[in-house]
Image (spheres, rainbow, N blue to C red):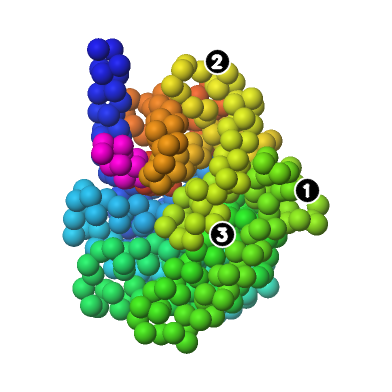
Amino acid sequence: MTDVRERAGFEAWLERQLEHSARQMLRSISPVAIVKQRPGFGQTVRPIAGAIVASPVLADWKPDPDYFFHWFRDSAVVVDALRLLHLEGRVGDEALRHLRDFTRFSLALNGLDGRVDAAVRDRRARVAPDFLQYLRDDDDLARAHGDAVAAETRVNPDGTLDVSRWARPQHDGAPLRALAMLRWANSVRLDAALLDEVATLIRFDLGFTLRRWREPSFDIWEEESGHHYYTLRVAAAALAEGAAWLEGRGDAAQARPCRDASQRVFAMLDGFRTEEGEAAHYRSRGLVGEPPSAKALDIAVILSAIHTHGSAPEHGVADPCMQATLARLEALFDAAYPINHGRPAGRGPAMGRYAGDVYFSGGAYYFSTLGAAEFCFRAAALGGSASHGWFDRGDAYLETVRAYTPAGGDLSEQFDQTTGAQTSAKHLAWSYAAFVSCVHARRAAAVPRRR
């Protein structure tokens, strides 16, 4: 009887948290009622429709980080989660309006030009003296035009360039956005006008990915420049899925280079595999022959598998090398985080990014722990004798998220590895989106279990 009650309580929490996550995630989409002041930069930012901020909470690094930006990567993750909410009937026509606004906002960004835009002209005169050290230089801004805007990492939600120094270029945003738009186009009935706009954005992002995938860029965490597993994996998926979409539209000439490039990227991804026999796993950086990295074991590899679900099976959740990567990450964080020591039965380890992380608490992330859970549910959905074990393993991760989520359901970016207290950005849209996609994957995996 106790197990039945506990299971009922868990299922009820899932539903409550899903509803709360959906509401809170929507706050970050087109936050037009919020005005952000950055007095140090002499800025007043008034968001426009279609922007998606990483967090709608106004902060200035005292102590919480300023995440009131439209990140290309985060916004793609959020707009994909919006699709799931729409398919489940939790968000109706509002989702289609958001999609239209997001598509138009994204296309309009392509017209930005750091050489001539009024928003960056004479910017030094508006910046406080002690903020000049954080200001981008002219040469850096001058590179922000044409398709290079899609490599900007982030822009202001009023549709202007970010004038602060940041990690650029970053090449994961365009392929992630292409994947999100392809899923909208393939799974949701869109009117002809919206479908045409979505198609225009898909073509742009595929073109960007096709031209840029060979070039080094900053990693998903915006810390190191080079060739990174996550960035290449999402590029491979976008090019492969894009090729199929183009072929379906009768555009074989454009599909061919995308498919050829996708195969080359997958071949390059094999170079991230360690040569350790059955213990082989994927490094997040450091191709074979390159110097080893302390950040080689990184949750970004697992996130790449769930962010590209439905694409080619290689380098996906069924890949034994990918599963071994998750096992190594579990062991890493189980040993490193005090909150994982002596945890109750039925609760998985809280997961972070990589060993030695020092950003804020350097602790567990909601989207990391939820990403591990989603990986398990997607593995369970493949069926086979191990499916029940994978499903229970996913639920164990969710029990950990439940244990460190306050009663109100609010999710920040991190929870401290020693105390479990929330840290870093409050109301992180990615955290809420990760919960939405994780529960969606769980429900899909639960279907074969009932047969």
Picture coordinates of residue 129, whole percent (x, y): 65, 55
Disc 1 crowd rating (10 Å Cα; few below 14, some 14-19, many 20+) is few
Position of 343 with respect to 279 (left or right) is left
Amino acid identity at mark 2: Gly
Real-space CA distance between mark 2 and mark 3, rounded to the nearest whole angstrom: 35 Å
Picture coordinates of residue 162, whole percent (x, y): 53, 63
* Residue designated by label 1: 292
Real-space CA distance between mark 3 and mark 1, rounded to the nearest whole angstrom: 20 Å
Q: In this rendered view, identify the residue nearer to me: 187 or 69.
A: 187
Disc 3 crowd rating (10 Å Cα; few below 14, some 14-19, many 20+) is many
- Looking at the image, which residue is at 46% across and 50% down? 306
- Quarter of the image where the N terminus is located: top left
First in residue order: circle 2 vs circle 3:
3
Q: Secondary structure at mark 1?
A: loop
Residue range highlighted in magenta: 441-451
The dot on residue 233 is 3
Q: Quadrant of residue 359?
A: top right
Amino acid identity at mark 3: Arg
Real-space CA distance between mark 1 and mark 2, rounded to the nearest whole angstrom: 32 Å
Cβ atoms under marks 2 and 3 closer than 8 Å: no
**Residue 345 within the segment the image draws in magenta:** no
Q: In this rendered view, identify the residue nearer to me: 331 or 104.
A: 331
Amino acid identity at mark 1: Pro
Q: Secondary structure at mark 2?
A: loop
First in residue order: circle 3 vs circle 1:
3
* Residue designated by label 2: 342
Considering the whole magenta stretch, tell me its main secondary structure.
helix
Position of 19 with respect to 360 (left or right) is left
Picture coordinates of residue 5, whole percent (x, y): 25, 17
Q: Secondary structure at mark 3?
A: helix
- Looking at the image, which residue is at 51% across and 81% down? 256
First in residue order: circle 1 vs circle 2:
1
